[in-house]
Every structure is written in C-alpha cells, then in structure tokens.
Image (cartoon, rainbow, N blue to C red):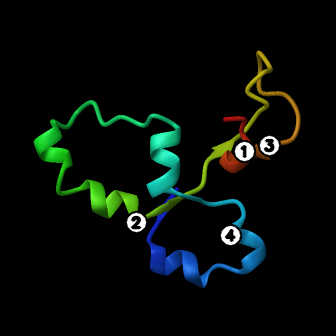
C-alpha cells in the first residue's frame, strides 16, 4: 500500500511505525522500475520518493507454506 506524505501525517503515532518512507527505503531495498527508462523515471522519482509504503506478508517468508496467523513485516526491522 502506498500513501502520500499528507496522508501519513494523519495516521495515529502508534500506526506510523509500520510505514516506511520511500526516499530512504527504496534505495535500501534496491528497488527497480524495469518498465521505465531512466528518462521516464526521472520526473516520477521525486513524487515516488515523497510517499510512504506498508507491506503486508501473510506468512513467515522463511516457511514453505502460508500457515498460521498473518503478520505484518516492518521493513525498518529487517537487517541491513
């Protein structure tokens, strides 16, 4: 899920910890936009960088099958 910076400011403080800021997290995750050329991405990058994201995983990614309660992965908690 992706929201704007304005929407992020409306979230309760205890919810904000589950969201990541794309300006810092996209480079950390080595995110790529393979369908866009560098020229096409250039005007979009500042808009994308100013958004926040939240990732939902419905199973422990170390498990072979989706068994048990769904969990939310907090990207900030991942090792570098």
Q: Are marks 3 and 4 in contact (CB under 8 Å)?
A: no
Quarter of the figure with residue 4: bottom left
Give the distance between the C-alpha atoms of the residues marked 1 and 4, in whole angstroms: 13 Å
Residue at x 73%, y 27% (from the top left corner): 61
Q: Earlier in the sequence, mark 4 or mark 2?
A: 4
Q: Which residue is mark 4?
A: 16
Taking the image as shown, residue 46 lies to the left or right of residue 64, namely left
Residue at x 77%, y 27% (from the top left corner): 66
User: Residue 14, position in %: x, y?
Assistant: 78, 73
Location of the C terminus (image quadrant): top right
Numbered tag placed on residue 70 in the rendering: 3
Crowd band around label 4 with a 10 angstrom C-alpha radius: few (<14), some (14–19), many (20+): some
Up/down of 52 relative to 40, above or below: below
**Between tags 3 and 1, which lies in front?**
1
* Residue closer to the observer: 69 or 37: 37
**Between tags 1 and 2, which lies in front?**
2
Crowd band around label 3 with a 10 angstrom C-alpha radius: few (<14), some (14–19), many (20+): few
Taking the image as shown, residue 12 lies to the left or right of residue 5, namely right
Q: Which residue is mark 1?
A: 73
């Amino acid at each position: 899920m992706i929201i704007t910076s304005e929407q992020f400011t409306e979230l309760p403080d205890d919810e904000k910890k589950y969201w990541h800021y794309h300006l810092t997290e996209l480079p950390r995750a080595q995110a790529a936009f393979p369908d866009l050329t560098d020229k096409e991405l250039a005007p979009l990058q500042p808009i994308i960088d100013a958004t926040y994201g939240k990732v939902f995983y419905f199973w422990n990614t170390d498990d072979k099958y989706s068994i048990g309660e769904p969990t939310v992965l907090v990207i900030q908690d991942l090792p570098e």
